[in-house]
Image: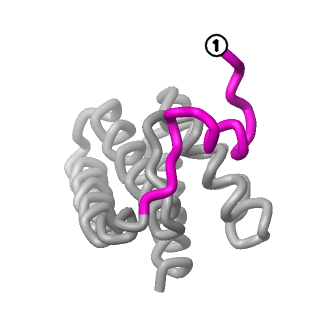
Amino acid sequence: MAIINTFAKCLESPYLLEDPTAADRVAELLAKAADRLEGAANLRAGEGDPTDLLLLCHEAMFCGLRALVYARGYREMGLRCLMLACEALYVKTGELDAEHLRRFELAQRLKLAPAEALESASAFSRRVLELLA
């Protein structure tokens, strides 16, 4: 199996495909992201489990990433191609700061402090909403 390390290779693989109906799921993904972000904020306010807070922040960011890619008419079948698609469609065009993707990866690996994860997820969610407005 070839190494998939570019947007073009993702499109040649079974892990990313053009889907004219993908944009129809954006609202659902944004609602799920908002729900996860609210859950994380509630955990923070109530001094809940830090790991749960990190996981909710990661899920909120994941939904935001998917919403961005889906809005451009693509569906992903793997995290690597989701990241590469977002980079190609938004970061390389200057619409999205690469730091958001780095923070997403740190959240995925549970490498952020709870407050930092919540701030990162909130900032990313705000940017996603701006891009999709």
Image position, residue 31 (x, y; %): 25, 67
Residue 94, magenta (yes or no): no
Residue drawn at point x = 47 percent, y = 34 percent: 78
Image position, residue 3 (x, y; %): 71, 21
The residue singled out by tag 1 in the image is 1
Image position, residue 92 (x, y; %): 79, 61
Query: Does residue 17 lie above or below 130 as drawn?
Result: above
Check disc 1 and give the amino acid type: Met
Residue drawn at point x = 31 percent, y = 44 percent: 56
In this view, the residue farthest toward the bottom is 133
| Rendered image coloring scheme | one colour
Image position, residue 22 (x, y; %): 38, 63
Quarter holding residue 105 = top right
Identify the element where label 1 is drawn: loop
Name the one closer to the observer, 19 or 86: 19
Quarter holding residue 94 = bottom right
Q: Give the range drawn in magenta.
A: 1-19
